[in-house]
Amino acid sequence: MPRITRAAIIQASDALPGSDDLSAIKKAMIDKHITLIQEAADKGANICCLQEIFYGPYFCAEQDKRWYDLAEPIPDGPTIKLMQELAKNHKMVMVVPIYELAMTGVYFNTAAVIDEHGSYLGKYRKHHIPHCKPGFWEKFYFKPGNGGYPVFDTTFGKIGIYICYDRHFPEGARALGLNGAEIVFNPSATVAGLSEYLWKLEQPAHAVANQYYVGAINRVGTEAPWNIGHFYGQSYFCDPRGQIMVEGSRNDDEVVVADLDLDKIREVRDTWQFFRDRRPESYGSLTEI
């Protein structure tokens, strides 16, 4: 029988635009996502991935240490504990990107992975940290990831994670493929402009080069008071041939669902032998620069 995994990705707008109450912002976003996670479960999803730092706005649009208060330890913080209960109740693997407090004064942009029994499997910490206009001041908030490129072996497939700006770097995408990933999720927060062109170029290219499925997630709407641009949604899944299978809207909160035939990975890899024909012995200089 074919190995079919029904996967869901969630794109959502800021639930309390312009609010200064961090506790209220966090609660409103979590409450919104509980409803959307329920929708994913009702649609039969086996796996569900949320957007980058799902429980708040994209606060990296400014540099203000008050946002440090949104960070939580993983897996012992309240948000991951709640998501473990939801994963167990819905019998659904979940990828949950939050702001991680590793120790006093040390923070990461991290996604936790939880299995369908509610067990915590591990986490991925974003490696590549931007610091640039029009308001992506992430080095103020995040230490670069130090946990490598793990792949999580779940009942519904081998999952890898790459977070937002990571997608501009093919090396980590290749590492995930070599580590056995069948589905790679890229939770993001990116606005219209140059990146919108790249949005449907880079990640299908990763899917082709590494012959796995990609689930690309982007939030929607504008976020006051910064208004750095329009988060253009268009979350999508693409297959191991780089073909977009299903795509979300540009403006609306949405649960995007696709049936992923994991057996197609072998079919594609038996046709295009990219992993066989690699020449790693010739690539040494890539890590010397």
Image (tube, rainbow, N blue to C red):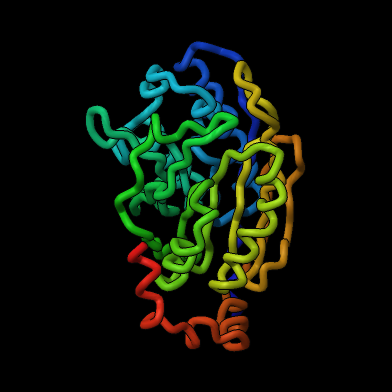
Residue 87 image offset from top left, x and y in percent: 46, 46
Q: Residue at x 42, y 22 (%)?
A: 67
- Residue 143 in view in this figure: yes
Residue 160 image offset from top left, x and y in percent: 46, 60
Q: Residue at x 44, y 65 (%)?
A: 176
Report which quarter residue 61 is drawn in.
Answer: top right
Above or below, 175 against 129 in this view is: below
Above or below, 63 against 183 in this view is: above
Q: Nearer the viewer, residue 88 or 267?
A: 267
Q: Residue at x 49, y 51 (%)?
A: 166
Residue 237 image offset from top left, x and y in percent: 66, 58
Q: Residue furthest top?
A: 20
Q: Is 91 placed left or right of 74 in the picture?
A: right
Residue 34 image offset from top left, x and y in percent: 55, 34
Report which quarter residue 144 is drawn in.
Answer: top left
- Residue 56 in view in this figure: no
